[in-house]
Image (spheres, grey):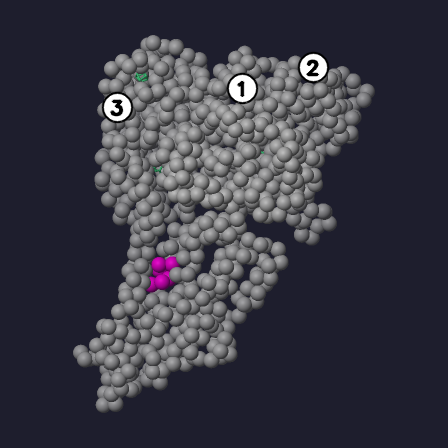
Amino acid sequence: MSADAIVATALSRHFVGRRPLFSAKPAPVARAVDGVSFRVPRGSCFAIVGESGSGKSSLARLLVGLLQPTAGEVVVDGEPLSALDATGLRRLRRRIQLVLQDPRASLDPRMSVFETLHEALAVHGLHPGRKARAERIATTIGLVGLSPAHLDRFPHELSGGQRQRAAIARAIICEPDILVLDEPVSALDVSVQAQIINLLMELKQRLSLTFVVITHDLALVEHIADAVGVMYLGRFVEQGAAENVCDAPRHPYTQSLMAATSHAGATGKAGVLEGSIPSPLAVPSGCSFHTRCPAARLIAARDPASAVATPDGLLPRRCVTQDPVSQAAPNGASTATCHFQDELPTARPQLQPA
Amino acid sequence: MSAAAGTTNQAPETGTAAPAAAKQRWSGLRRVVAQPKGLVGLTLVVLYLLLAIFGPLLAPHDPFRQDFAATLKAPSAAHWFGTDQLGRDVFSRVLIGARATLGVGVGGVTFAFLFGVPLGVLAAWRRGWIDALVMRVIDVMLSFPDIVFALAIVAVLGASTQNVIIAVGVVSVPIFARTARAVTLSILAEPYIEGSASLGASPKRIILRHVLPNISGTLLTLSTLLFASTLLSASGLGFLGLGTQPPNPEWGTMLGESRSYIRSNPYLATFPGLFLAGSALAFNLLGDALRTIYDPASRHAVRKRPWLGALRRKARPASRDAKPEATTGPAPAVSVRDLRLAFRAGSGLLEVVRAVDLDIQPGRTLAVVGESGSGKTTLLRAIATLANPEQVAVTGGTILIGGESAIDLTPSAMMDLRRRKIGVVFQDAASALNPVLTIGAQIAEAVRIGTDLDAAAVRQRCAELLSDVGISDPERRLAMYPHQFSGGMKQRIVIAIALAQDPQLLLADEPTSALDVTIQQQILALLGDIQRKRGMAVLIVTHDLNLVARFADDVAVMYAGAIVEHGAVAQVLDSPRHPYTQALRAAIPGGAGRRGKPLDAIGGEPPMVGMLPAGCAFRPRCQRTHGRPECGRAEPPAEMVAGRKVACFFAQEGLS
Ligand SMILES: Nc1ncnc2c1ncn2[C@@H]1O[C@H](COP(=O)(O)OP(=O)(O)OP(=O)(O)O)[C@@H](O)[C@H]1O
Ligand SMILES: Nc1ncnc2c1ncn2[C@@H]1O[C@H](COP(=O)(O)OP(=O)(O)OP(=O)(O)O)[C@@H](O)[C@H]1O
Ligand code: SF4
Ligand code: SF4
Ligand SMILES: [Mg+2]
Ligand SMILES: [Mg+2]
């Protein structure tokens, strides 16, 4: 067994659209995930953060083999996914479980919570016997903070948070080694959220579970993650140890993400990024963040000689024309993909008083 | 909030879920008989089936006995339907013929079902060349008229009952295959299929356990509808002498035999004809009723209704103190008084929303926060007039929307109110979108309501809405389907749809829970803008206290169906007075210093619906009660304390 639970190498997934009829234009290609590499050591928690539409869920599907990569490879527990046949993949699924983003939609409307959990056990032939299974189901449902009375409910008879917990119960009931959670707590109120996070951290310690957590909640990242990858338009623009990335972000995108996070009770409006994430059908040239990068605008203003005028304002030429490569920070704990990362202030900007 | 004392003494034995499951199983049947056409159709179908089973026992005469002394007799007391050219009793022959006639129908539909459905499911599952091949063959088969096709088959196979079944069955195979393929495709696009695939379920299991149960309603409907046409095709063949062979009676064959006597003895054709037409009608009515229930397009439109609704209205206690337009200022956009909502469970009513009062003035925002399961969504759906009356009962109180009551409206008045005034963003965005329609079509539908823009202008408006909610490249993306968008994008599309109708009241259930701060700010800024411009009132359900702090004017904290603290945001969040609100504040993650430490979850379990503890509902988890007897005696009334309403006997004890 390798020390890494998951290794992703140059992973890409491009969605090819339908070519418009009677048009010479090529079919549109959406670069949802574009050359992502990272490794998750066994027993650690890796967080993926990024704006809505940056490719996080697509990456999660790639990790568990629900999507086939267009390029690159995923190795789970030393086994490359591409080498597994359908049966092998299904067997692997017991050990790597995905909790999908939308809890209501991911539960079969015609199955009660009990049937849903029972199916998970039946599929993998775990805990054979009626009584053993019922017991296992009762324990699991308690772990996620639901009561046995919820077992006979159908998804539409549960509240949003209860459905989310049912989905988490389904994932942990087979005792997987790796859990991929897509926005696991965003549908939950703070108190249940705390309960679930505590449960996940406990599982991590007790069973040395490996986590990949997708979230947009940076406070959560700081709280539970060991390492983090910051995604923008299908790529990791910064990755490394969680405390380094959160406390001393080096990429302008990460910096603005951190600036926008406000902690408990803060009421001010933090400076947030303007504009919206470009479509993966038309990724900007050079550094894909240049259409919104606040740092690039400052640098261009400081040094107009090497700047060019673009529809998005005056920008450094390199940002518009040249793809930045990922470089390690001086302390080696993180890497960022920005031409000017060494010229930016790294202190965590504008932290709101707690 | 009015005094809520003594409202919570539901016996704890309520809420067993077995009856709920049974109810679910029978709800299809109940919804059929709730429609007049369903009731008539179902009754007739049952009668016909009884006829097929017991017909031979009921026949007063031997249907095969010929009596040349009494040929072609008109109907009489001895021979109710008269006698035919061989002197056989027509009534007995009609009774006996039921089995053959309906049998051909059943056989034909079964044949078509058994071949068509697997073919369609297979095509949808495998896609690729199998799909292309199946679809081509189906297209070719469908290009022949039914009866011609069936005739050709019988001509090749020879005339017999069995071959008629095959012929009419084969004719219906393409229709089954095509429908099964279409519904399977849409089910396969549902995220729960992906969910069970990621669980490791095998394809066989996914098809048998997840796809088939979910398409069964549509297939049942189709079978019933096709039954009628199959019956007619089969009888057509019988009429042409290609079906059941004499002397065995079958309604179509009997019609055929009576051809020569149609002038002189019309009753010979009348009775078999009536029975045949009646059975086709019966199955058609039933199929139609089933279609209203299972057809995705009409799923949300028709629910239940007529006479049941009227009875229910009477059973409800008359609503108290509805006093509209008495005050001077502008009418609040929403005004809820003493609202009580309960779920209908097998064992009675389970109260989920208990005596809720709230008002929102135009242009203001009220945030409702509270623990998962505390009844926020149920409250919001009731205000949106979307509570399903089969599941939720309004047991008391009033809801006024812009001064109009929103309770007990007729379906058309309800639609009208909704269309004119209310925009809703549901909690689970992905399931609020139709997986088989492009999002352009879905936004356009909302835009067209209430405007008469031309197609180009509608499209333009759709694109604007998309970019308003921060989705770039809108022109190209309008043509994409929901599954091609990310979770947060779907949530924003749902917001765009709600805004498209230009509502006076926006009800948003966790509208930004899947969005990062950047987009969240943009959406909130957009909402704020619309609010300022048009005075839209917003009720937002959320668990994000940061969002409440930034965006809302007032906040109502719900616990176990009641509002426990209600007031201006600054006051309630900065210095909460109710112990529950205080605990909520303490459970927020954040602060680099606390990394890896457990969060302060609120100890204990939230109460189950309908099983509240006596006295204050929060007592078992309360840090403040210290076992004081007051808390166990009665539910604390909401009282003004430090500028907000708090429902706690010891609210004066303030900050802990
Ligand atoms: N099947 C598909 N076909 C075409 N484009 C797709 C498809 N699936 C995803 N995309 C596109 O890929 C991009 C990334 O989507 P993804 O669901 O991975 O985002 P995400 O980071 O999870 O966002 P969110 O936080 O909103 O869930 C989006 O722009 C989306 O439109
Ligand atoms: N059809 C139903 N039959 C019985 N109980 C139900 C039904 N629907 C919901 N419930 C229960 O009613 C309670 C309130 O549900 P509701 O969806 O209003 O909660 P909520 O406050 O919106 O929670 P969340 O924040 O998790 O979405 C929950 O405990 C739920 O289990
Ligand atoms: S390379 Fe230029 S545009 Fe890209 S993040 Fe760095 S400064 Fe901004
Ligand atoms: S102190 Fe008593 S009344 Fe107040 S919240 Fe606690 S239990 Fe309820
Ligand atoms: Mg996602
Ligand atoms: Mg809810």
The answer to which of B115 and A320 lies nearer the viewer is B115
| SS type, badge 2 | loop
Give residue A345's mark: 2
Q: Is mark 2 within 8 Å of ligand 3?
A: no
> Does the residue at mark 1 contact the one at mark 3 (Cβ under 8 Å)?
no
> Does the residue at mark 3 contact the one at mark 2 (Cβ under 8 Å)?
no
Which region is colored magenta?
B282-287
Please tell me how crowded label 2 is: few (under 14), some (14-19), or many (20+) other residues with Cα within 10 Å.
some
Could you tell me the amino acid type at mark 3?
Ala
Residue B486 in percent (x, y) is at 57, 37
Q: Is residue B473 among what the camera can see?
A: no
Residue that numbered label 3 is attached to: B614
Residue that numbered label 1 is attached to: B596
The answer to which of B362 and A92 lies nearer the viewer is A92
Label 2 marks a residue whose chain is A
- Mark 1 or mark 3: whose residue is earlier in sequence: 1
B234 left or right of A92? left
Residue B387, quarter of the rendered image? top left
Q: Quadrant of the N terminus of chain B?
A: top left
Label 3 marks a residue whose chain is B
**What is the spatial separation of the Cα atoms under label 1 and label 3, in whole angstroms?**
38 Å
A207 left or right of A158? right
